[in-house]
Each structure stands twice: as C-alpha cells, then as structure tokens.
Image (cartoon, rainbow, N blue to C red):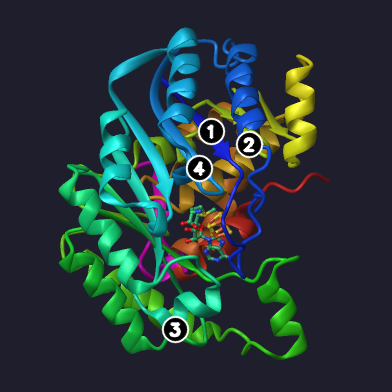
Amino acid sequence: MSGIYLHIPFCKKACHYCNFHFSTSLKLKHELIDALCREIGLRADYLGERTLSSIYFGGGTPSILDKTDLEHIWDALHKHFAWDKDIEITLEANPDDLNYNKVKMLRDMGINRLSIGVQSFFDTDLQWMNRAHNEKEAVTAILNAQEAGITNLTIDLIYGSPYTTHSMWQKNIFKAMDMGIQHISAYCLTVEERTALHHMIKKGSFKPLNSESATEQFTYLMDTLTGNGYEHYEISNFAKPGFRAVHNTNYWQGVKYLGIGPAAHSYNGSSRSWNIANNKKYTDAITNGKLPQETEIITPAMKYNEYIMTGLRTVWGVETAYISNLGQSFLDDFLTNIEKHLISGDVMHHNNQYYLSRSGKYFADRIAMDLFWVEE
Ligand SMILES: C[S@@+](CC[C@H](N)C(=O)[O-])C[C@H]1O[C@@H](n2cnc3c(N)ncnc32)[C@H](O)[C@@H]1O
Ligand code: SF4
C-alpha cells in the first residue's frame, strides 16, 4: 500500500534556517487548494493502486488549513482513493496555530498524528530562528493536542546551533519526554544556501557552527532517548514502541508515493517526478489541466545509491538480496567496499543485513558515499 504527500506552501514567517518551498503571502491560498484537489484527480492512477495507507500534510505550514480547506481536500481524496482502515494521517503544525478548537477540528476530521514544529523550548533559540511562536505557545500547543485526544504526537527539535548550550539541549529533550511525546524528530542544524542564516554567517552576525559541539549533542540525544524507551529507528527519528511513522518509514523502505502540490516529489518504483516550486505557475498549469513537473527514470545505479543512502540511516539497514536484484556487479562492489567499515566497527551485519553500529551513526553520510556506485 502506498501514501500521498500534500505540500501546503505557505508560512506566516520565514524561519532563518529554512529553504523548503513556501510563500509568506496567503493571497493564492484558495486557488492553490483548488489546484491540489484537481491534481489529485489528474494523477489518481500514478501509484497503480487506489488504496492509501498514509496521508501526510507537509509544508510549509499545513496547520494554516481551515475546516473548509480540509473538507475540500477530503472530498477529492475520497473520490479517487480508498483509505485503509488503519490509515495514518499526519499533519505538520506550527505551535501558534494550535488552539484547542483547532486541534479538535483536526482530530474530528480524522487527522490522527500531529507533527508539531517545536524546534526548542527556549525563547532565545526561537528568536534567532525567527519562529512565529514562543516557548509558552509550544507547551500550550502540546497540551491542547493531548487534551483534544491526539494520541500520536511527534515534535521536531533542532540541535547543533552555537547558541543552544548543552544544558539547553538537555532540557529540551527532558521536556519532550516529560510531556509524554511519543515520537521525536531531532535535526542537526544545517546551513542551507539562500537562507537568512547562510547570509548572517557569511557576514559574521551569526557564530559559525561547531561540529564537535553538534556531535556531543547528538550523543546526548541518542543515549538519553534510547535509555528512556525510545527506539532510534532512523538517524533523526526516535519512537516509543508502536509509534514509528508509517508514512516516513515507507519512504525509507522504497514504497511508492504520490506528491501533490508545488515542489512535491513522487516516486512510482521506476521514475521520480517533481512539481514546479512556484505557487502561481503551479496553480496556473493545473487549472489548465497540465502537470507542471519534470520526470527522471531511475537507473539501477541510482536505485542502488538511494537504497544505500536511505537504508543505512535506518534500523533495518541494507540487505544483500535487494542489492543483488539490482545486478550482481552492485553486490560485488558492495561486499568489497563494506569490508573496511566492518573492520573499523562502524558497520555490523547479521546474516545478510548490514546496518550502522553506534560509532557508525556519526558518519552515516560519509559511509554511504563511500559505498556509492560511481559510473566509469
Ligand atoms: C519543512 S519544516 C515543516 C514543519 C513546520 N512548518 C514547522 O516548521 O514547524 C520540517 C522540519 O524541518 C526542520 N528543518 C528545516 N530546515 C532545517 C535546517 N536547515 N536545519 C535543521 N532542521 C531543519 C525543522 O525542524 C522543521 O520543523
Ligand atoms: S521551518 Fe516550517 S514554518 Fe519555518 S519557514 Fe520552514 S516550513 Fe515554514
């Protein structure tokens, strides 16, 4: 079974670190939601099946959607797809949008998993990030979600900034655990091109990042969460038993998905496509019955590299049976290149499954790149 991702490309404020696709003008919201609904119809055959196991509203800021918007999207999704009885429906939400009535409405509409972008429980962090919320709103949003009956809550946290001290980071983790959060996504701050953060570091008004300090915070994160009953099932993701994300796990395991909306990506097993990252151009094209997207065919080498990159970051690791299905030469190459990582202890294996050891988790990307297939 497969999933649908819907990209909601609007935000109240531009966070200084973020280069996801969004606009801070809501002018096109209604036209864009109409276009999302039309795209669902235009691409309903993309997955080759019509039963959904997950729906994921990502952004941007999906919590700007009101009841009418969601009803409109629901109509389109129900018209074209059957929903599995255990379907996971996640919506990314910013804390300042989550008053009690809003969460209740979301829950009543069938959203059964909320992903709240807390980032930090410290106002000083939230200020340099240029977030639209403060610490008090983050706590209130979580309490509102719990009171409204959302039993599957995940929050995003960011570590590795030179302004987030170790003591602050420790308190962030404990606050999340104390509040009974079932799932935590913790991302190491990255400096993306074309962001205010990038600009500020270049002109010296933001301290440069310190990788040693980020590594220390990652160590504390892993040790504390795994020591308190969370499974570290993907480099940035931790879940209490039974609360792993269905939708994201499907991505990591190579399951097909359909991405709707500007900048959304889709994968059908043999090709990948991505929609134009421009709200106006996207809306105009869809309104004229055209799909504003580019497509690339996935070659076995691309599939191998993607499998290594995503698989190694997960608790399932990578399996030789999958690799040999792509071609014997990939398996030969893999078995040769993996040897030094087994000797160093950064990779371990159990029968035909290879996964990162604790020490290897610090170098996931470097190890993956070393294993990549490079065309002659
Ligand atoms: C695209 S955002 C959408 C969620 C929602 N709009 C919000 O911000 O609360 C998903 C998450 O990616 C993370 N993120 C985005 N840019 C990042 C960066 N440069 N470094 C680390 N984490 C980042 C943040 O934790 C954010 O919550
Ligand atoms: S982090 Fe979230 S709220 Fe901030 S700009 Fe990015 S998508 Fe928007």
How far apart are the two marked residues, 1 and 2, measured between alpha carbons? 7 Å
Q: Position of residue 164 (x, y in %)?
A: 44, 84
| Sooner in the amino-acid sequence: mark 4 or mark 1 | 1
In the image, the residue with mark 4 has its CB under 8 Å from the nearest atom of ligand 1: yes
Under mark 4, the amino acid is: Gly
Q: Dots 4 and 1: beta carbons under 8 Å? A: yes
Residue on which the image places disc 4: 58
Residue on which the image places disc 3: 124
Under mark 1, the amino acid is: Leu
- Quadrant for ligand 2? bottom right
User: Mark 1: which secondary structure?
Assistant: strand
Q: Position of residue 121 (x, y in %)?
A: 34, 74
Q: Residue furthest right?
A: 376
How far apart are the two marked residues, 2 and 4, measured between alpha carbons? 9 Å
Residue 124, located in which quarter of the rendered image?
bottom left
Residue on which the image places disc 2: 264
How far apart are the two marked residues, 3 and 2, measured between alpha carbons? 32 Å
How far apart are the two marked residues, 1 and 3, measured between alpha carbons? 32 Å
Graded by Cα atoms within 10 Å as few (under 14), some (14 to 19) or many (20 or more), the crowding at tag 4 reads some
Graded by Cα atoms within 10 Å as few (under 14), some (14 to 19) or many (20 or more), the crowding at tag 3 reads some
Residue on which the image places disc 1: 6
Q: Position of residue 120 (x, y in %)?
A: 39, 72
In the image, the residue with mark 3 has its CB under 8 Å from the nearest atom of ligand 1: no
| Sooner in the amino-acid sequence: mark 1 or mark 3 | 1
| Sooner in the amino-acid sequence: mark 3 or mark 4 | 4
Under mark 2, the amino acid is: Ala
Q: In this view, does 236 lie above or below 28?
A: below
Which residue is located at x 47 percent, y 38 percent? Answer: 65
> Can residue 376 be seen at all in this image of the molecule?
yes
Q: Dots 1 and 2: beta carbons under 8 Å? A: yes
User: Mark 3: which secondary structure?
Assistant: helix
